[in-house]
Image (cartoon, rainbow, N blue to C red):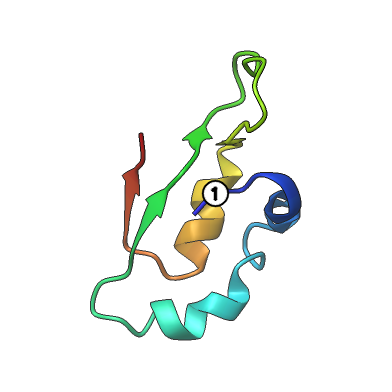
């Protein structure tokens, strides 16, 4: 899971951005995702094609979707 490019707009309203997933994730015994981004507002993106970083509201969006556990990638 990441919040780059087209998916970044979901964080405009983090409490509802992933609402479509909640009926599936919230009813699971354990819902876990792999976060493919860093959560930060600091630093400068490196000169490369892809930049996966998201603001702290990403965690609020993931929790509102019903996710119980988040792992960090890379």
Indicate whether 70 appears above or below 56: below
- Which residue appears at 67% of the width and 29% of the height? 49
- How far from the left and from the top, in percent, is residue 5? 72, 46
Q: Within 10 angstroms of label 1, few (less than 14), some, or many (20 or more) residues? A: some
Q: Dot 1 corresponds to which residue?
A: 2
User: Depth check: 51 or 16 in front?
Assistant: 51
State which quarter of the image contains the C terminus.
Answer: top left
* Residue located farthest toward the left when viewing the structure as drawn: 29
Residue 27 vertical placement versus 41 (above, below) = below
Q: Residue furthest front?
A: 49
Q: Position of residue 2 (x, y in %)?
A: 54, 49
Q: Nearer the viewer, residue 49 or 54?
A: 49
Q: Residue at x 60, y 74 (%)?
A: 19
Q: Is residue 74 left or right of residue 55?
A: left
Horizontal placement of 49 versus 12: left or right?
A: left
Q: Quadrant of residue 69?
A: bottom left
Indicate whether 17 appears above or below 48. below
Q: Residue at x 75, y 53 (%)?
A: 6
SS at mark 1?
A: loop
Q: Quadrant of residue 7?
A: bottom right
Give percent across and percent down for residue 14: 64, 57
Relative to residue 33, is residue 28 depicted above or below?
below
Question: How many labels were placed on the picture?
Answer: 1
Report the residue at 62% width, 15% height from top. Answer: 46
């Amino acid at each position: 899971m990441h919040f780059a490019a087209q998916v970044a707009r979901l964080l405009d309203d983090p409490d509802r951005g992933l609402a479509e997933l909640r009926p599936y994730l919230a009813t699971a015994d354990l819902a876990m995702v792999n976060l493919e981004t860093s959560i930060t507002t600091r630093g400068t993106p490196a000169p490369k094609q892809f930049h996966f970083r998201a603001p702290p509201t990403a965690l609020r969006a993931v929790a509102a979707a019903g996710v119980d556990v988040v792992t960090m990638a890379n």
